Amino acid sequence: MSVVEVLLGIDLGSTTTKAIALDRSGRIIGRGITNTRSNYEVASQIVRDEALVQSRFELVRHAMAADPELAGIEKKFIGSLVRNFRQRQHLEQLEWLESELRRCADAPRYAPNREAVREALSHICQAMRARVSGHFSELAVRKSDFFRDLAAVDYVQAAEQFSDAKHASFDVLCGLFDAAILVVENAAGDWAFERHAGPALEQTLAAAPADIREREARLRAAVESVGSLELRVLGIIGTGYGRQRLPFPKEQIRSEILCHGLGAHAMFAGTRTVLDIGGQDTKAIQVDGAGIVTSFQMNDRCAAGCGRYLGYIADEMNLGLHELGKLAQESTCSVKINSTCTVFAGAELRDRLSLGQKVPDILAGLHRAIMLRAMSLLARSGGISDEFTFTGGVARNPAAVSALQGLVQQNYGVRKLNISPESIYTGALGAALFAQRAAEGGNAA
Amino acid sequence: MSTEECILAAGVDVGSSAVKFALVRDGGNGDASVLALHNERIRRRDLRKVIREGYEASLEAAGVRQKDISYTASTGEGELVDFRRGHFYGMTTHARGAVFLLPGIGAVIDIGALHARAMRVDEHSRVMAYRMTSQCASGSGQFLENVARYLGIMLEDVGPLSCEAKNPESVSSICAVLAETDVINMVSRGISRCDILKGIHLSMAGRYTKLLRSIDACGDVAITGGLAADIGLCRALEEKIAEEKLAMRVRTHPRSIYAGAIGAALWGAYRHRVLARRTEVVA
């Protein structure tokens, strides 16, 4: 059996957990991301598995690109293979969620209305299943990639439809979901490549156009050869907010400041200042030419100014984090948000909405508010030097970026702003690079 | 119309996480009785719809029609109650409702989803002094609700679970949203749900005793607002009061969470009579 050696970095953040898989040459071959949940071990297991599964897809892509008969169709083919794979994972989790919902509904308190509750659950789960293929179609725009978020939106919509105030109230149904989803996401699943890749391949081939089906035998061979590879993890380093609780020995843990500095340097070698807005903290970091941290400032006292601020707002509005920035960009006249506290900003948002103010204008104000806080942190860490790299989940938000650009221009003049589309993985990349260094240094961790 | 005639009045208390409704029959001589109460949690639904449906449900429960209601008053964030006749400030309605439910009290602490406010009241439910929590949601009801959701606990189980705590875990982080992450950490450290909830209750109670002290409250203190239904919080407040040796006694009433709505209905009935009397004089 042939072996591919990989190095892993895991960044356990407060909102999301990320993993990066590197091959021996330091090239990124797989990524994994999931929502953090109270069982950190499960969260890190999931991203680790996902990064390894993605590595296999990447290896299939390499195999296809190297085959003259398959080169050129790999992007489309693997895109569809991955979607089918994810859909199967999603359906499996949905099945699990349904059985957990039924179990929760067996609690004595529901006894008087058990039949009504069960019936509502059946309808809801059926409606949820009916929506799955839509989530994973080629042109689908998903609010989130996480099972929890997708399931919650579908569930609440169906629950509104199938609840009845007397026997199976909306409130009871929501409570059941909250309890069941916790069980589902805190128990380790098994997302093994082998189990879903085969059926996903069949599904992809069955729906493929004739020119792809003609090459079926070679495609099968490519997928199967990668399926039988052994992915050997040579080293693994953990970082992030939850790093102290990762099931790793101490020498496999690095601080998130170090990982972010190194990750940003690896993405953009000219980086001197890094702003990372993560879920529960904001970091302003100054690095030298080798990616080594020279000074930093951190806010982890208050959620205002962190990614969680926008996450909270998105929750309030029943929006996915993906959509928030796009909406804010439609603003013509940003409002000034009076509240500092995240929870109060959420209430202010509701008040403003009920007064008829426009959603984009309010959201633009909220984005500016979070960036004003980041600016003061940057100033305290030593200002903004060229080049300036913005990382963390918030860097994917276009409205946050344009608010930041405006403020940087105003306060520091022209600076080159680097943002990688993969910026959410900066910490994990830094960790994976530390893992690579450790592996190169032989046994010295 | 005679001013002593019995009239029906409705109160709608719009909070940020639930809307409370009260229907009251008011005899005009201080004799009033509650006909129906209704609590509708918003859970991100369309607020206008929640208000309309909750109002109709409470009319149905009392077996009366909307045209029988002489005065509908809103309180709290009542702008969306488009069928109201008047609006009363939350502080006055909670004071009125609390004195109605628990005669003899000297102070009220209204604990809602976002704010807590302490009021010193007299026997006519006039507010003599008050103090509110600042512009930060630390220790708010919303925070507790989020934590409950995170722990997979139904809101009504929060209190009973908290009462079973053996070693309450103190909550270190101050920010409501980050304390939420603290809770995730506690769970992953293996601390029981009971101890987490009790720890939060105690830290909240600490804030409330500070508020109560700042208005020189003494004697019986009524808890109103959505969190009055949380037995764990009430216990924690009792414990804090005992610990700080304050001359206060916590009092609750099964209908405490409706104090704002009841107060609004009572004030509405009162205003209706005043207006009716004026019309009579003019006529």
Image (spheres, rainbow, N blue to C red):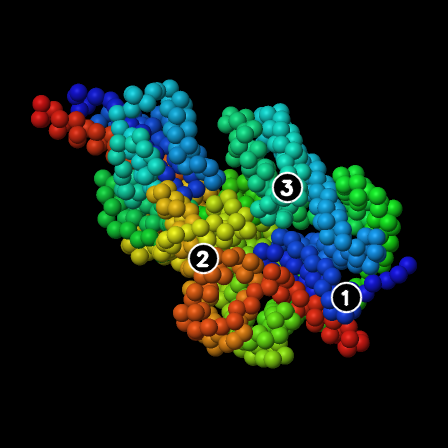
- The x and y percentages for residue A98 are 67, 36
- The x and y percentages for residue A381 are 49, 75
Q: Residue furthest right?
A: A1
* Element marked by disc 3: helix
Residue A66 appears left or right of A297: right
Residue lying at 87% horizontally and 54% vertically, measured from the top left: A225
User: Which quadrant is home to the N terminus of chain A?
Assistant: bottom right
Q: Which residue is mark 3?
A: A135
Whether discs 2 and 3 lie on one chain: the answer is yes
Mark 1 nearby-residue class (10 Å; few <14, some 14–19, many ≥20): many
Instruction: Compare marks 3 and 1 and give the one earlier in the sequence.
Output: 1
Q: Which residue is mark 1?
A: A23
Q: Spatial distance from mark 3 to mark 1, Cα to Cα?
A: 31 Å
Residue lying at 54% horizontally and 40% vertically, measured from the top left: B154
Q: Spatial distance from mark 2 to mark 3, Cα to Cα?
A: 28 Å
Instruction: Compare marks 1 and 2 and give the one earlier in the sequence.
Output: 1
Q: Which residue is mark 2?
A: A367
Residue A90 vs A305, above or below: the answer is above
* Element marked by disc 2: helix
Question: What amino acid is found at the position of numbered circle 2 in the picture?
Answer: His
Question: What amino acid is found at the position of numbered circle 3 in the picture?
Answer: His
Task: Specify whether residue A32 is in view.
Answer: yes
* Viewer-side residue, B185 vs A392: A392
